[in-house]
Amino acid sequence: PTFSAKEFQRLGEIMYEARSLDRTDGVWQLVSTVRRVVPYEFSGCGAVDLLHGVDPSIGHSTYPREFCQLYMGQGLLADPAVHHLLTSVQTVTSSADQPAFNEPKDITSLKLDFGIKTCLSAGVRGMHGACSYFAFSNFDAKQADKLRLLLDILTPHFHLSYMRCNSA
């Protein structure tokens, strides 16, 4: 996948903006700018604390509320990006890291019940077990590689902004 000159410029602007954020809602607005490069329908971000057990929280989400409640209770631990954070020492993870991952059928059914067709998630391991999680759904499957590259570049910046704003 390649970025156009305009997309590459936007990527730099997003990284620059991430350094100066000091409000949680600003982080979400920044994460939402991914849509300008790869359009999607739903997105969400949250935190997982690895040292104090998996007690996930949602920072912001455009997914349906009922889906979020069910997924946070049943599906988050099965998400390949989060699962990889829990079972490896890798710093940045992606659901695309494990293409052969067999999602539990009840999670697949849950996603389909809420109209979620494509999904790519990314996780970032921070200091002292503080991890963040970002998910994007219902994007054009032909754009999956581009979205993955975009997230590989941006999620560490999103993570630092998210953690800084949530600790303030």
Image (cartoon, rainbow, N blue to C red):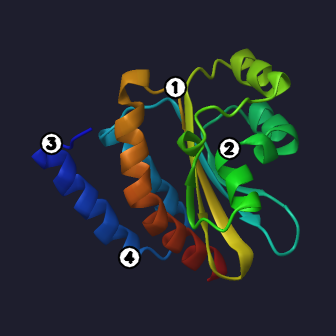
Q: Looking at the image, is 6 positioned above or below residue 39?
A: below
Percent coordinates x, y for residue 119 in the rendering: 57, 32
Label for residue 4? 3
Q: Residue furthest left?
A: 5
Of label 4 and label 3, which has the lower sequence position?
3
Position of 120 with respect to 61 (left or right) is left
**Mark on residue 138?**
1
Q: Can you say which quadrant of the picture contains the N terminus? A: top left
| Nearer to me, 113 or 76 | 76
Q: Secondary structure at mark 1?
A: loop
Label 2 and label 4: CA atoms lie apart by 28 Å
Question: What residue would you read off at disc 2?
Answer: 80
Q: Which mark is residue 159?
A: none
Identified at 60% across, 46% down, the residue is 44
Find residue 19 and name its label: 4
Left or right of residue 164: residue 54: right
